[in-house]
Amino acid sequence: DIQMTQSPSSVSASVGDRVTITCRASQGISSWLAWYQQKPGKAPKLLIYAASSLQSGVPSRFSGSGSGTHFTLTITSLQPEDFATYYCQQVNSFPSTFGGGTKVEIK
Amino acid sequence: EVQLVESGGGLVQPGGSLRLSCAASGFDFDIHWMTWVRQAPGKGLEWVANIKQDGTKRYYGDSVRGRFAMSRDNAKRSVYLQINSLRAEDTAVYYCVRDASGSYLDFWGQGVLVTVSS
């Protein structure tokens, strides 16, 4: 199975900051990667698919990049509603697998 | 409006069984793969299983393969997850999720809690 490793596991940031989260795959997955946002007590929400495509309705301050084994999620100008946990997921092969998550906390 | 409503969760003893159901509405159910994802309390997301539109292909995560079985009934617009030989580590919220094109998970149910404890 493909292992997904996210870093950092948590990050403290302020409103207006730029935040970057990294996800690495244990083998090449082309661009078969998604990013999700999860708030406490809620189901996850799809933000980015195909590594860099923005899901409908998601603010443009979210962006994704990368291919192969190295991917990043960037949030420019962090907003109060962006404090949450973020997960990457590979869909290159089944079973699909998620990264361990990155919690974005208020500094 | 797209809706996925899970049911069937609850408290079960180790070694027991449970059948989760997910009723879908608001979209063309029979053109989508469907997936179950779970989340143990305070932990991350774990992909559990998925099923092809016509039910002819299923895939399972390593930790559940051989104990869990996913099925669907397109006439009833529902998917199911039969979970057997339950262990404490199966305690989690189980989410029913719609697969968009490319297997991205674009719509999630509210989740149902399964607790395995004696």
Image (cartoon, coloured by chain):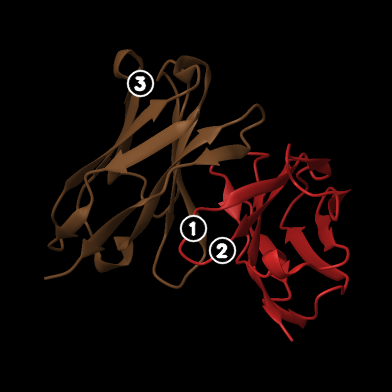
Work out whether residue A93 can be spotted. Answer: yes
* Numbered disc total: 3
Q: In which quarter of the image is the C terminus of chain B?
A: bottom left
Residue type at mark 1: give it: Lys
Identify residue for label 1: A42
Q: What SS does tag 1 mark?
A: loop
Dot 3: chain letter: B
Report the Cα–Cα distance between label 1 and label 3: 24 Å
Identify residue for label 2: A39
Dot 2: chain letter: A
| Tag shown at residue B5 | none
Identify residue for label 3: B77
Residue type at mark 3: give it: Arg
Image: A62 above or below A106: above
Tell me residue B30's x, y (percent).
46, 16
Residue at coordinates 43% horizontally, 15% vertically from top-left? B54
The colour chain A appears in is red
